[in-house]
Amino acid sequence: MFQHLLGPIVNGITIIVCALLGCFVLKGLPKRFQDITNKALGLSVFFIGISGSLQNQRIILLILSLVLGSALGELIDIDKQMTRIGKWAENAMGFGEGNFSKGFVTASVIFCTGSMAVIGGMNSGLQGNHDMLYAKSILDGVFSIMFASSLGIGVAFSSIPVFLYEAAIALCSGLVKDLMTPEIITEMSAVGSLIIAAIGINFILDKPQIKVANMIPAMFLPWLFIAIETAFDL
């Protein structure tokens, strides 16, 4: 089992190490430098999200998934639940008031939302091939440094949901490999990329205008819609 989980483990450890580096090495930057780097990071995340969403081949499916998935997430209020977990950890660890919850929620969403986590997790589980998750670890590490320098130690704790998410995909990959067609992965990735773009908007505005975590269910709806189409030959 360890062999199949090596990729998720490396990804989680990389996030922790790089987040700590961002917290304690770059944290001392003057506020005006933090502000401008946050805006630059927001623009970068927004560009990455928009670029990824352009691979979408079915715009109506994307819109339906985003709208209905966001409504479902709002009903469950995932953002509130994740923020509550972040606040609990913040108090339990004695970090005091700060950006812990924001860092935890923001980093968790951006590191879990995307095709690399899904495909990389499946490659780890099916083939023991961790190359994609290793590559993802490098990207996540860079973002961990930047996020942690402004949002703090909460970014490091995002390694927990990232590991659990990727490990679950790796362990269940044998069950879902026939269901994850290239079309489904493409559409899921496009929706996930738009969610990432929303994170960029929040960074640019410097306010949580969009409850991005509540959009998470939208990423999985293309799978449901395409499965229904296939089952009923629509």
Image (cartoon, grey):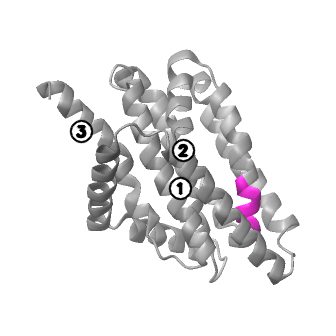
Which residue appears at 82% of the width and 72% of the height?
Answer: 27
In the rendered image, the quadrant that contains the C terminus is: top left
Percent of width and height locating residue 199: 55, 63
Crowd rating for badge 2 (residues with CA inside 10 Å; few <14, some 14–19, many 20+):
many
> Of the residues shown, which amino acid type is indicated by label 2?
Gly
* Residue located farthest toward the top when viewing the structure as drawn: 127
Q: Which residue is mark 2?
A: 52
> Of the residues shown, which amino acid type is indicated by label 3?
Phe
Q: Which residue is mark 1?
A: 196
Q: Which one is in front, 148 or 200?
A: 200
Which residue appears at 30% of the width and 50% of the height?
Answer: 65
Percent of width and height locating residue 16: 71, 52
* The stretch drawn in magenta includes residue 146: yes
> Of the residues shown, which amino acid type is indicated by label 1?
Ile
**Marks 2 and 1 close (CB-CB < 8 Å):** yes
Percent of width and height locating residue 143: 71, 54
How far apart are the two marked residues, 2 and 1, measured between alpha carbons? 9 Å
In the rendered image, the quadrant that contains the N terminus is: top right
How far apart are the two marked residues, 2 and 3, measured between alpha carbons? 20 Å
In terms of secondary structure, what is the magenta stretch mainly? helix
For this view, does 13 lie left or right of residue 46?
right
Using the image, tell me which numbered label, if any, was put on residue 225. 3
How far apart are the two marked residues, 1 and 3, measured between alpha carbons? 22 Å
Magenta region, residue range: 143-149
Q: Dot 3 lies on which element?
A: helix
Crowd rating for badge 3 (residues with CA inside 10 Å; few <14, some 14–19, many 20+):
some
**Marks 2 and 3 close (CB-CB < 8 Å):** no
| Lower sequence index among marks 1 and 3 | 1
How many numbered badges does the structure rendering display? 3
Which residue appears at 50% of the width and 18% of the height?
Answer: 126
